[in-house]
Amino acid sequence: MIIRDNLNLPKNVLKVIATLGWAILVYLAWVVLVDSWERSYFAIGALAGQIPAEINPFIDRYTAHPVQTLLHTGAGLVFAVLGPMQFMSPVRDKFPKIHRISGRIFLPFAIASGVAALLMGLSFPVWGKGWNQVITTVAAVFMVFAFVKAFLHIRKREILFHRRWMMRGFAIGMGVALFRVFLEDVLQPMGLSFNDSWNIVMAGCFPVTLAAAEFWIWATKPKKKMIPAIQATG
């Protein structure tokens, strides 16, 4: 991450935040990668007629809707591998051609992943409160909207706005990974029921990752230079 001068936070502070943020991002991308691979395995098995005799309701969602699952998880594999690369400043600045090519591959898959998530949210069983389905739908729609906006901005060479909307869309995708981590590795081991855990992570994970993206957008936003009153009036 290349951090330039004239930003909203001191350079040293931004370097610490960037290092911590990249560590978390790489871990969450790994979670998406592993999760997408496992779900793809179940979906491919279902298409081949190989469904385990004993399967829990959570996994059964994927075997019951294998095509939707593969659309989502297949795109998720590309999302997890190429997504972080889009935000690597050294790659973007020193190897712009690689950045553009990977971006052209990434964006269609990212949009497809969001569309598949929307379809899954409407057709898959949802646990916990009824508003969980609303949250899933809103998150998926916003993810697709963000990546479409990012595409439209880069077509107009509006780099700054393209960067912001890419971050917002990617943050929603990382919200799914954070969802998995807290659902399976934090809340349930603490003794919370599956439904209660689902309610908590559904309500919190997407706002957390989106807030993190908005914070970084603000922190790395160039300060506006103040023009002295005498100079401004001539």
Image (spheres, helix red, strand yellow):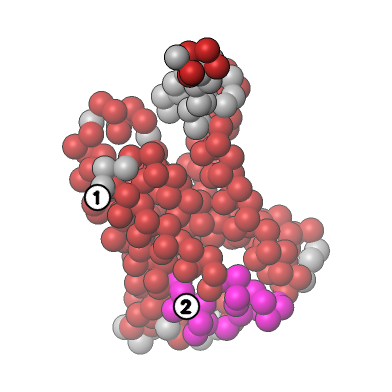
**Residue 49 image position (x, y, % from top left):** 35, 87
Q: Quadrant of residue 2?
A: top left
User: Could you tell me if the residues under marks 1 and 2 are in contact, i.e. CB atoms within 8 Å?
Assistant: no
Residue drawn at the location 54% of the way across and 60% of the way down: 176
In magenta, the rendered stretch is: 117-136
- Please tell me whether residue 61 is drawn above or below residue 162 in the rendered image: below
Q: Residue drawn 29% across and 60% down?
A: 108
User: Residues under labels 1 and 2: Cα distance?
Assistant: 30 Å
State the image coordinates of residue 70 (x, y, percent, origin top left).
36, 72
Which corner quadrant of the image does residue 95 belong to?
A: top left
- For mark 1, does the 10 Å Cα neighbourhood hold few (<14), some (14 to 19), or many (20 or more) residues? few
Reading the image, the residue beneath label 1 is: 155
Q: Which quarter of the rendered picture does the C terminus lie within?
A: top left
Q: Residue at x 55, y 36 (%)?
A: 218
Q: Secondary structure at mark 2?
A: helix
Residue 146 included in the magenta stretch of the image? no
Q: Which amino acid, by three-letter code, is at mark 2? A: Met
Callout 1: SS:
helix
Does residue 66 appear left or right of residue 103 in this picture?
A: right
Q: Main secondary structure of the magenta part?
A: helix
Q: Position of residue 219 (x, y in %)?
A: 56, 32
**Residue 124 painted magenta:** yes
> Could you tell which of marks 1 and 2 lies nearer the N-terminus?
2
Residue at the far right in the pictured view: 191
Q: Residues within 10 Å of mark 2 (few under 14, many from 20)?
A: many
Q: Amino acid at mark 1?
A: Arg
Q: Which mark is residue 120?
A: 2
* Residue in view at x 48 percent, y 19 percent: 232
With respect to residue 169, does 90 lie above or below?
Answer: above
Q: As rendered, which of 142 and 123 lies closer to the eye? A: 142
